[in-house]
Image (spheres, grey):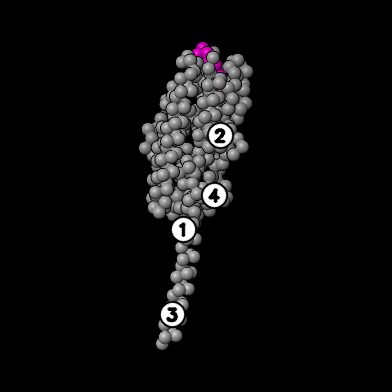
Amino acid sequence: MQSMRQSCGVLLGALAAALMTVIPLQAQEKVNVVASFSIAGDFVRNVGDDRINVTTLVGPNSDVHVYTPAPGDAKKIADAKLVISNGLGLEGWMERLVQSSGSKAAMLVASNGIAPRQPGAHADPHAWQSVANAKIYAANIRDGLSAADPAGAQLYRANADVYLAKLDALDREVRAAIANIPEARRKVISTHDAFGYFADAYGIAFIAPQGVSTESEVSARDIAAIITQIRTAKIPAVFLENVTDPRLMRRIAAETGAKIGGTLYSDSLTDRNGDAPTYIDMVRHNIKALTSALAE
Ligand code: ZN
């Protein structure tokens, strides 16, 4: 009887030891999160840090408007606990992809709660270009991560607080930079209409031959209208974008004598070695490009 009890004790001890080794391993397992495009991917990385594993579907320097899902994307979504999209019509390909994946992941629309611009028939999806909106994205992502992974809620809150403070500082930086540009020169041409939220927030006029999606065609008439506008409004600079064909802007610059002010990053970050590997780098790069082209 005693030896039986002893062996039971040994067995229980072994079981407890096994459990002890299993539990910390489980706690270390990262939460799989899928972000539709690189900018959302950067936000979620800042809030989730080491606790999560982020997969971004539309990678650096790629155009999220016209993305064709890759064969492995459905599997990535099926394996995720949380899927984050921008919403506002940016990812027209997303709904079908999620359906085909059979995923049970929580879905988060990161732009929830922003005041959408509606310049034409469609909402303008580029809400992240205002830093105040980026703060709403970060807060939504904090709440989405906390709901999907309640054990990490405290960490997500602490990380989000740090990131939100950085965004506040960034917003002040943008305003200070733009204050240095003479008011009459605060107007530029970009390829597609991606900077409407930036324009509304910071008071620089953006004119674009292409609408809020890169899918729309630019007609000869659109180009002629832009050229007239550059001449009459004396617009000092045109900008290239990392997600659009540079030839159109080069042609407009050649015909009007407006200078090419460099590249603006609108819808996509760069890889680690580029000018804009993070959202904060992207905004800093853009204000540097704008101020150096527009300041007298
Ligand atoms: Zn765009």
How packed mark 4 is, by other alpha carbons closer than 10 Å (few <14, some 14-19, many 20 or more), is some
Please give the residue where the numbered disc 3 appears in the rendered image: 8
Q: Give the range drawn in magenta.
A: 232-238
Please give the residue where the numbered disc 4 appears in the rendered image: 73
SS under mark 3: helix
Q: Which residue is drawn at 54% across and 45% down?
A: 57
Q: In this view, does 183 lie above or below 279?
A: above
- Mark 1 near mark 2, Cβ–Cβ under 8 Å? no
Q: In this view, does 168 lie above or below 159?
A: above
For marks 3 and 1, give the CA distance. Answer: 28 Å
Would residue 217 be visible to someone looking at this image? no
**Nearer to us: label 4 or label 2:** 2
How packed mark 1 is, by other alpha carbons closer than 10 Å (few <14, some 14-19, many 20 or more), is few
N-term mark: 4 or 2:
4
Which amino acid, mark 1? Answer: Ala
Please tell me which residue lies in front, 275 or 194.
275
